[in-house]
Amino acid sequence: MDSMQLDKRLDSTEQVVEEIMRLHRSLPPRPGLDDVEAARSLILNVEQEDQAWLEAIANQRKPSDVPGDLFTVLQEMKKGLVLFRSKEQRREATKLLDLETVHSSFDEFIQRASHCIASPSSNGSAPSCPPRVPKPPASLYLSEKAPVRPKEMVSRDDSFVTTKAKPSSLYGDALVAHRSPQLLDSTLTTGKFAGNDGDNLSLIKLASLIEVSSKKATKVLNLQNKLTEQVEWLPDSIGKLSSLTSLDLSENHIVVLPNTIGKLSSLTKLNLHSNRITHLPESIGELLNLVYLNLSSNQLSSLPSSFSKLSQLEELDLSCNNLPILPESIGSLANLKKLDVETNEIEEFPYSIGGCSSLKEVRADYNKLKALPEAIGKITTLEILSVRYNNIRQLPTTMSSLASLKEVDVSFNELESVPESLCFATTLVKLNVGNNFADMVSLPRSIGNLELLEELDISNNQIRVLPESFRMLTKLRVFRAHENPLQVPPRDVAEKGPQAVIQYMNDLVEMRNEKSLVVKPKKSWVQMCFFPKSNKRKHNSMEIV
């Protein structure tokens, strides 16, 4: 208190004015209107969130084999944690609102002091002051009604000036609000909200940023790795950003999305990868203009049924989650071009996948797939299919209909064979069937139909003989066949590269053809006329008689 000099002796009006000025300047900068609005909204959100959590905890059922007192202890600890985290989340907002309360109070005092100086009494005595304004509550958060800024004050991007004319008094200039108006730059950056030290955004600063973005009709907002660890949910006010077309919230610690996320009606790109989201609100289906959605590296175990409404979606990344299945509604995404579901727990694709008629790329590596549906043959636009590290035993025969197929990777599965029908997908450029180990013992006889094939991997299998049609793969430039018990061609030939193998297979076929000519001479015309193949049995019987 001594450092504030509150007990300093004052002997004149001038000294009193100077002291009023000093006390006014000693306050921290006044929060902006957007910050105040965000703080109030934030506290309301926290209260609603607390209520939801407490109700969820209260509704938990005690397992039959757990003592009642023990379960009660668990519930009470959960409630205590919710309230503690709630207090932490409110703290900054409450502090900001308290500061606004003090500024509002000081504004009233400044106005009274201005009247005291500008209106001296007619008899020359000390000037009289207006009646004292009641002191506002100590905390805006705890009050029933928020204090209102004086009508004489107007806002110009978080700076405040009085609209009254300056008094003609000697001290008039000193008593006018000392901040000059400043206009914010039209370019919105998070640096202003993160602080001078570059710290990440707290919940209150995020709420403030949302308010400013809403008023500026911001179209692109990048908050990648910009939020503090304590920010686990987004304020409901996020729904105000109706002009937003791109939102990046990746690499943060978000656990849940608010229902108001569905109000971002202009959004075309939403990036939420690398958070801790456990479920999605049904309202996400209201993002009807969404084209790109990245939900990778979260903790999702299911998808809402409203996913079927995302009819404009072209790219969907669900990799690195805990999804055991894909919903049937996935088939409603007729404009979907890229689907990534790598590293999940998926055991099968729904038959409705055939409805994704625009799909070009499917990546489902590191799952538990045992087979692919025959409906995949309906996706005639499919170009890339990667299903590495699964438990697939056979491929669907309908793959012959995939007229645009260029790359197939079914390595590290339990594949027993490659269907002949795949060889009718003549646009194929890359084929990887390696590392199926003891299960795969041969390649399809008609593999030579894949005349555009450039890369072929059959490594780590049990293939002994390559089919004769292999010689037709004249464009092959990469051939991996190590760790196979190859006999035709010999291993040393295979190690020389694809062209050496093709030449070997050509020579082998030619050699066999030459031998067949020597060993089996052509029938004479007499034999062909008098002993046709169909009468051979009859001829033999006659000969015996």
Image (cartoon, grey):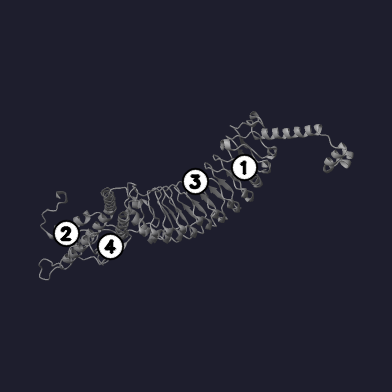
Comparing labels 3 and 1, the label whose residue is closer to the camera: 1
Residue 418's mark? 1
Residue that numbered label 3 is attached to:
342
- Measured Cα–Cα span from mark 4 to mark 2: 19 Å
Q: Residues within 10 Å of mark 4 (few under 14, many from 20)?
A: some
User: From this viewpoint, is residue 169 visible?
Assistant: no
Residue 161's mark? 4
Q: Amino acid at mark 1?
A: Val
Q: Residues within 10 Å of mark 1 (few under 14, many from 20)?
A: many
- Per the image, label 1 sits on a secondary structure element best described as loop
In front of the other: 526 or 113: 526
Query: Relative to 221, is 97 on the left or the right?
Result: left
Q: Residue at x 10, y 57 (%)?
A: 11
Residue found at the very far top of the displayed protein:
492
* First in residue order: circle 4 vs circle 1: 4
* First in residue order: circle 3 vs circle 4: 4
* First in residue order: circle 4 vs circle 2: 2
Total numbered labels placed on residues in the image: 4
Q: Amino acid at mark 3?
A: Glu
In front of the other: 414 or 168: 414
Comparing labels 1 and 2, the label whose residue is closer to the camera: 1
Q: Horizontal and vertical percent for residue 248?
A: 43, 52
Residue found at the very far bottom of the displayed protein:
122
Q: Horizontal and vertical percent for residue 199?
A: 33, 47
Q: Amino acid at mark 4?
A: Val
Comparing labels 3 and 4, the label whose residue is closer to the camera: 3
Q: Amino acid at mark 2?
A: Val
In front of the other: 457 or 15: 457
Residue that numbered label 2 is attached to:
17
Residues tagged 3 and 4 counted as in contact (Cβ below 8 A): no
Residues tagged 1 and 2 counted as in contact (Cβ below 8 A): no
- Measured Cα–Cα span from mark 3 to mark 1: 23 Å
